[in-house]
Image: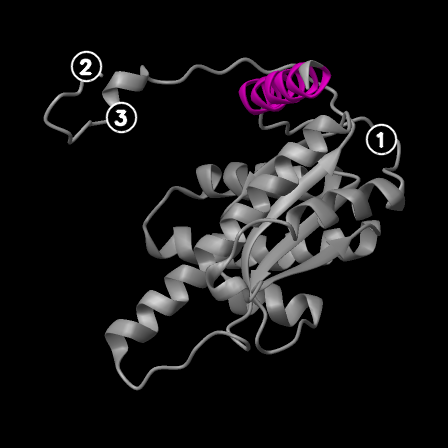
Amino acid sequence: MTDNYTRNAVNAREALDAIRSRRSIRRYEPRPVPRELVGQILDAARWAPSGHNRQPWRFAVLESVEKKQQLAAAMGQRLRQDLERDGIPAELIEKDAARSYQRLTAAPVVIVACVSMRDMDPYPDARRSHAEYLMATQSVAMAVQNLLLAAHALGLGACWMCAPLFVPDTVRETLGLDADWEPQAAITLGYPAEVKQKARVPLEAVIQYLDADSSV
């Protein structure tokens, strides 16, 4: 029993250390990521909790330079159009588009995380339909967190990019995804070529105990 307790304590420390030490890595070594590792990472993703246990996540894996360039170029074009409508100066638009293009194309692997409502519950009213959709997208977000932590635990770096949320149709059409796959995020993946340090706001700034006696 003592051995089990010690083993569980070690596992808990390792899990907490992984959560605290994970960082968003945007620069990677050029060496490829073995598909076996990608599979382990995606397997960890699918063990996240999900609404009704319907597992509404879907993952498109991009490994070829051509596919990543196609996606980056299509998203970049939409970004330019949006920023032009916002009245952003051309030089700033090009700088933003170039940065996004480089991040997507320089990563050895890009995983596009999508949500599918195919197996979620249908409702006749907008209120519950919207709640069901949020439930599904939150499920995908939890799967992505599993993915990020698994990548970190396996010695890889990853970065969660939300840009597909702004152009889901462009991402779907460029990659030829099924009609019910709605892109939610692009996760770049590879062996880290940088070390990052980040801070967090104090815990007491983001929590509120609602019990009468919060000192217990």
Q: Quadrant of residue 123?
A: bottom left
Give the labeled residue for mark 1: 30
Q: Residue 206 — which label?
A: 3
Q: Residue furthest bottom?
A: 124
Residue at 63%, 36% in the rendered image: 148
Instruction: Examine the rendered structure and indicate whether residue 119 appears above or below residue 210.
Output: below
Element under disc 2? loop
CA separation in Å, label 3 and label 2: 17 Å
155 on left or right of 51: right
Q: Quadrant of the N terminus?
A: top right
Q: Quadrant of the C terminus?
A: top left
Give the labeled residue for mark 2: 215
Crowd band around label 1 with a 10 angstrom C-alpha radius: few (<14), some (14–19), many (20+) = few
34 on left or right of 195: right
Instruction: Examine the rendered structure and indicate whether residue 181 appears above or below residue 149.
Output: below
Q: Earlier in the sequence, mark 2 or mark 1?
A: 1
Q: Quadrant of residue 195?
A: top right
Q: Amino acid at mark 2?
A: Ser
Residue at 56%, 65% in the rendered image: 56
Q: Which residues are magenta?
A: 3-22
Q: Give the image location of residue 151, x and y in percent.
A: 71, 34
Residue at 67%, 40% in the rendered image: 188
Crowd band around label 2 with a 10 angstrom C-alpha radius: few (<14), some (14–19), many (20+) = few
